[in-house]
Amino acid sequence: MFFKKKPQTTINPQQVALVEHAQQRISQKRGFNTHLLISLFLLFFALVLNFAFGYKADFRPFNSDWSIALAALLGLFLVVHFLKVYVFHSFMGKAWETKQMDFLLDKQAVKVEKLKRNLDKEAALKASAEWEREKQQKNITIIAAVAENNALGKDNKLIWHLSDDLKHFKNLTKGHHVIMGRKTFESMPRALPNRTNIVISRNPSYSAENTHVVKSLEAALAFAQEDDRPFIIGGGEIYRQALTYADCIELTRVHDHFDADTFFPEIDPAVWREVWRENHDKDENHAHAFSFIRYEKIDS
C-alpha cells in the first residue's frame, strides 16, 4: 500500500523578499502620512492659538475671511483624516495594507516574471547550444573485422589478410582519433600514421611513442571529445565496453569460421540495425569472401 505524503508548505525565498519589500513600502507610507497628520495638527493648533489668544497683536494675519476659511479647512481635513484612520479604518487600515501589499506584489511579480522569462530563454539557448555541440561532437564508432563465429584474432595477431579491408579501415579512420587497448597497440608495428593514437592501459607507467596513454575507455573518449567521429579499434574487451557508448559499428564480416582466442561481442538486433552493406567475393587477392556492414544504434 502506498500512502500519499502530506504536502509540505514551502516558502519561496523570492516571495519572502517581495513581502519584506512590500512591508517596507507600507511602513514608509504610514510614516509619511503620520508625519503629515502631525504637521497639519501642529499647524492648525498654532493657528488656533494665534487666532484665539491674539499672539502678536500688532501683527494679525487672521483678520481676513480667507485665513479663517483656511484654518477651518485644515481643521476639517484633520477631523476627517482622524475618523478614517482611527474610527472607520478606511485608510491605512487592514484593507488598505492588503491593497498596498497586493499592488506591490503584483508590480514586483511582473518584474520577476520578466526576469524568469529572460533566464529561461538564456537557459534554453544554452541547452540548445550544448545539445548541438554534443550532437556534432560525437559519432563514436566501433570498427572491426569479424569472422562468422565472431573471431577477431589469435595470439594477439590477425587471422586473415584482406587488402580491401585494410584500405577501408584506413579511409574511414584517417584524420581521426583511434582508441585501442594496450595488446591491440602492441600487435601493430607502430602507431597508426595520420591519426591520433590513444592507448588504454591500467599501468600508470606505460608509455609508447606517438601515443596518448589513458587508464580507461571513458578517459579515452574524453580525450577525443573534440573529434566528430572517434574510432574504437579493439581488442575484444574494449569492444565489449564500447557497445554502451558507440553510435555506429563499421563491421567487416569475414564469411568463414576461424579458430581464435579473441572474439567480438554479439550484436543485439534489438539495439542495432543494419543500415548499409557492401558484399565482396573472394578472389586472387582475397582468400575469403567478406562484407562491409554498417550498424547504427536504435534510438531508445
Image (spheres, rainbow, N blue to C red):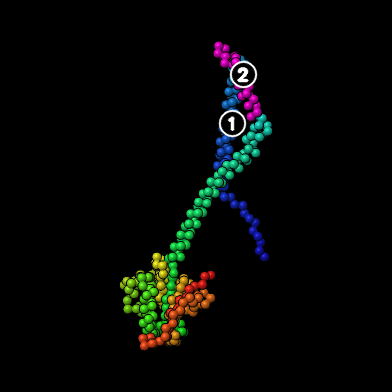
Q: x, y percentage for residue 123?
A: 49, 56
Q: x, y percentage for residue 61?
A: 57, 16
In the displayed structure, 179 sits above or below 259; it is above
Q: x, y percentage for residue 195?
A: 35, 71
Task: Determine which of the numbered discs, if any, sits on residue 261 in the image.
Answer: none
In the displayed structure, 114 sits above or below 132; it is above
Q: Residue, x 50% and y 54% (percent of image)? A: 121
The amino acid marked with disc number 2 is: Ile
Front position in the image: 259 or 11: 259
Q: Residue, x 58% and y 29% (percent of image)? A: 36
Q: Nearer the viewer, mark 2 or mark 1?
A: 2
Task: Locate residue 279 relative to residue 108 in the image: left or right.
Answer: left
Q: Which residue is mark 1?
A: 34
Q: Which residue is mark 2?
A: 68
Instruction: Decide which of tag 2 and tag 1 comes sooner along the chain.
Output: 1
Q: x, y percentage for residue 8?
A: 62, 54
Quadrant of the drawing holding the N terminus: bottom right
- Which structural element holds mark 2? helix
Range of the magenta residues? 54-81
Front position in the image: 285 or 29: 285
Q: Quadrant of residue 88?
A: top right
In reply to whether residue 63 is colored magenta, the answer given is yes
Q: Residues within 10 Å of mark 2 (few under 14, many from 20)?
A: some
Magenta region, mostly helix, strand or loop? helix
The amino acid marked with disc number 1 is: Thr
Q: Residue, x 37% and y 75% (percent of image)? A: 171
In reply to whether residue 89 is colored magenta, the answer given is no
How far apart marks 2 and 1 lie (CA) works out to 25 Å
Task: Locate residue 52 relative to residue 162 in the image: left or right.
Answer: right
Q: Residue, x 64% and y 32% (percent of image)? A: 85
